[in-house]
């Protein structure tokens, strides 16, 4: 009888060991993506000088890692920015994500680490990519929860308060 019990226990343990789960691990990174159409008209106040015709877009991918409870424990961002229609002599200085309404000049929460002179404008066009930018976990969670509460903008020498900005929209 004890021999049969031992065999039953061994079979049960083997069955548990062979079972698989279809749910992904909660520590697996996820990569939500956000976009924004960038326009000088969205700046506060709107740009009205020679750079008022600038257009552009940004794609921001967050790579987040979560703990077993689903809390974000780490996050990085990749920014892909494309801008056009800059007049001759323009220069891009900085770019970042701000938290706040479209009607305010709000605090920066994620800096791309872009520096003055790093981006070249050729024939009115500029593009840059910044990868591996650290994002505080609590900021990443707020962006995921309410992307419309954040905007991305680019600053130029002529418009140090911002030349083009757009509200974040989650696309994946």
Image (cartoon, grey):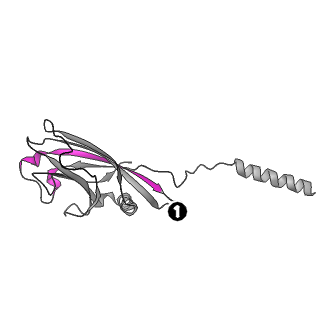
Report x, y in % for residue 134.
Answer: 36, 55
Residue at 45%, 50% in the rendered image: 30
For residue 166, say whether it is visible: no
Q: Position of residue 158 (x, y in %)?
A: 9, 51
Q: Which quadrant would residue 122 be assigned to in this image?
A: top left
In the figure, is residue 98 to the left or right of 67? Answer: left
Question: Measured along the vertical axis of the image, is residue 124 above or below residue 60?
Answer: above
The residue at the point 40 percent across, 55 percent down is 75
> Which residue in the rendered view is the most extreme toward the left?
49
Dividing the image into 4 quarters, which one contains the N terminus? bottom right
> Which residue is under mark 1?
69
Does 43 lie within the magenta span? yes
- Please give left or right for residue 62 compared with residue 44 in the image: right
Position above or below: 32 against 98: above
> Exactly how many numbered labels are in the figure?
1
Can residue 110 be spotted in the picture? yes
Which residue corresponds to the image point at 12% horizontal and 56% vertical from the top-left? 46
Magenta span includes 81? no
Residue drawn 17% across the image and 39% down it: 125
Q: Which one is in front, 3 or 128?
A: 128
Q: Secondary structure at mark 1?
A: loop
Q: Quadrant of residue 106?
A: bottom left
Q: Out of 161 and 54, give the one closest to the viewer.
A: 161
Q: Which region of the structure is painted magenta?
A: 39-65
**Location of residue 84 with respect to 112 vertically, above or below:** above
Question: Label 1: how many residues lie within 10 Å, few (<14), some (14-19) or many (20+)?
Answer: few
Q: Position of residue 63 (x, y in %)?
A: 41, 51
Q: Nearer the viewer, residue 86 or 113?
A: 113
**Residue at the extreme right of the image, as rendered:** 1
Front one among 23 and 72: 72
Residue 171: give x, y in percent of width and height: 35, 48
């Amino acid at each position: 009888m004890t021999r049969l019990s031992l065999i039953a226990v061994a079979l049960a343990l083997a069955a548990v060991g062979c079972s698989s789960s279809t749910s992904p691990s909660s520590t697996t990174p996820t990569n939500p993506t956000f976009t924004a159409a960038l326009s000088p008209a969205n700046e506060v106040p709107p740009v009205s000088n020679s750079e008022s015709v600038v257009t552009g877009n940004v794609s921001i991918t967050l790579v987040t890692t979560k703990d077993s409870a689903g809390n974000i424990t780490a996050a990085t961002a990749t920014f892909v920015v494309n801008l056009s229609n800059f007049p001759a002599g323009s220069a891009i200085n900085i770019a970042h994500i701000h938290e706040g309404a479209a009607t305010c000049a709000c605090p920066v929460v994620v800096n791309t680490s872009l520096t003055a002179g790093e981006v070249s404008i050729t024939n009115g066009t500029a593009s840059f990519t910044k990868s591996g930018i650290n994002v505080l976990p609590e900021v990443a969670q707020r962006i995921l929860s309410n992307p419309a509460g954040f905007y991305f903008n680019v600053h130029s020498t002529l418009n140090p308060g911002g030349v083009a900005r757009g509200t974040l929209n989650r696309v994946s």
